[in-house]
Amino acid sequence: MNKKLTLNVNENLIDFAHHYSKISRQSISSLFEKYLMRLMQDVNLKDISSAARDLYGILDKETLPDKKDMRKVFYEKSTN
């Protein structure tokens, strides 16, 4: 459920928000919501170990290899 939020913000930031909203074709509310969601995600990442944090997002750009292909590579390595 969406609720209304009123903010007091520096006039330059308001001008920038209107400008960026226009060029990105997103409402200021949408931009602000996405920003807060990203902050929330970053805060949640701080709760996990540094090793897990380093791995976060590592596979976003790549698709996982097929299980059969992985088995084939493993089998080839183990028999050589």
Image: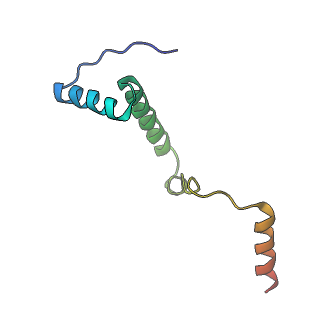
- Residue 55, relative to residue 7: is it above or below? below
Q: Nearer the viewer, residue 4 or 31?
A: 31
Q: Nearer the viewer, residue 59 or 55?
A: 59
Q: Quadrant of residue 36?
A: top left
Q: Classify residue 20 as left or right of residue 41.
A: left
**Residue at the top extreme of this rendering:** 4
Where residue 38 sits in the image (x, y, percent)? 44, 37
| Residue that appears at 26% across and 31% down | 19
Where residue 53 sits in the image (x, y, percent)? 51, 52
Q: Nearer the viewer, residue 51 or 11?
A: 11
Where residue 14 sits in the image (x, y, percent)? 23, 25
Q: Classify residue 43 as left or right of residue 17.
A: right
- Residue 23, relative to residue 54: is it above or below? above
Q: Classify residue 38 as left or right of residue 19.
A: right
| Residue that appears at 68% across and 58% down | 64
Q: Classify residue 61 as left or right of residue 14.
A: right
